[in-house]
Image (cartoon, rainbow, N blue to C red):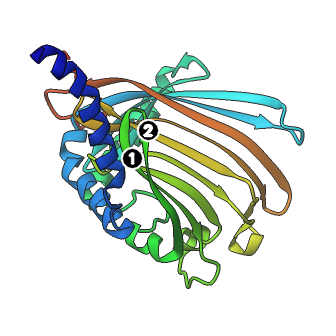
Amino acid sequence: MRIFGLLYLAPLLAWMLAVAQVAAPLPDIRQLMQQVQEHQRQLDALRESYTFSALQTVQDLDASGRVTKTATREAEDFFVNGHLIERTVKKDGKPLNDHDQQKETERVTKLVEKAEKTPRGQPLEGPSVSVTRLLDIMDVRNERRVNFRGRSTIVFDFVGRKDAHTHGLAEDASKKLQGTLWIDEADRRVAHLDVSFVDNFHVAGGLFANIQKGSNFHFDQELVNGEMWLPTGAEGTVQARVLLLKSVRQHFSERDSDYKRFRVETQSKDGKVAAPAEM
């Protein structure tokens, strides 16, 4: 009878816990994103003990969306001082020749040296915008709690405010975006992101490039080995006109896999990655 009672109560207790979770108040989005940023900083050191493989595919498309050209790149990715470093090992399925390997080693070595001197949270290259500033530019709406890949996740939609006062390329582009963000509730990490341009975005007044409405991007992360959130893939389509002449339409994707954890530093002075530890 005791066992029967436990079997009877188990699903009831599970249901009550689920109801309690759904009924729990949603966190303030600004505080949530600040926690995401803080958790990222706390885990940067642990993330630098990992390396993984990235397969990137770029397809040129014609006006009707048919693929006219495909290029692939395989890279070995790792982190230095919180910055992602990519070392190319293959192009279009073929290993780099000796000359290209030497050039890639020189490039990666310089990038590692730059990463060591660049504070965490600042980009190695190109413009950026902080999470706090991004929330000032965006309207956040439709906050909800959902089950995503078996985990409780806070989801919200966002859209750039056209009347927001912005400075710099990254902030200006943010006004043209809309999307949805999935945040793992327990770990306060980004699990999934969908974002797209809702209007054309002119770079240098359109003289350099014009990114067209509908260009989009998707990004995924997952918990690896039960201890570290790492990227698992990305995908998107870009439509643009460059230098007022050339129309560019491309679909790109990245698949990340083969995660390895290291006993020692992931990067040496010659730009090579150390041998992985046994998992």
Q: Which mark is residue 64?
A: none
Q: Determine the residue positioned at 27% across, 52% down.
A: 40
Secondary structure, mark 2, is strand
Residue pointed to by mark 2:
148
36 or 254: nearer the viewer = 36
Q: Looking at the picture, how far across and down is residue 271, in whole percent?
A: 31, 35
Residue 19 x %, y %:
33, 45
Kind of residue at badge 1: Thr
Pointer 1 residue: 153
Residue drawn at (61%, 61%) of the image: 178
Among the 4 quarters of the image, the one containing residue 37: bottom left
For disc 1, the neighbor class at 10 Å (few under 14, some 14 to 19, many from 20) is many
Real-space Cα distance between discs 1 and 2? Answer: 6 Å
Q: Secondary structure under badge 1? A: strand
Earlier-in-chain disc, 1 versus 2: 2
Q: Quadrant of the C terminus?
A: top left
Q: Which residue is drawn at 16% across and 22% down?
A: 6
> Does 164 appear above or below 9?
below
Please provide percent x and percent y for residue 102: 42, 30
Residue type at mark 2: give it.
Phe
Quadrant housing residue 244: bottom right
Residue sitting nearer the eye, 39 or 143: 143
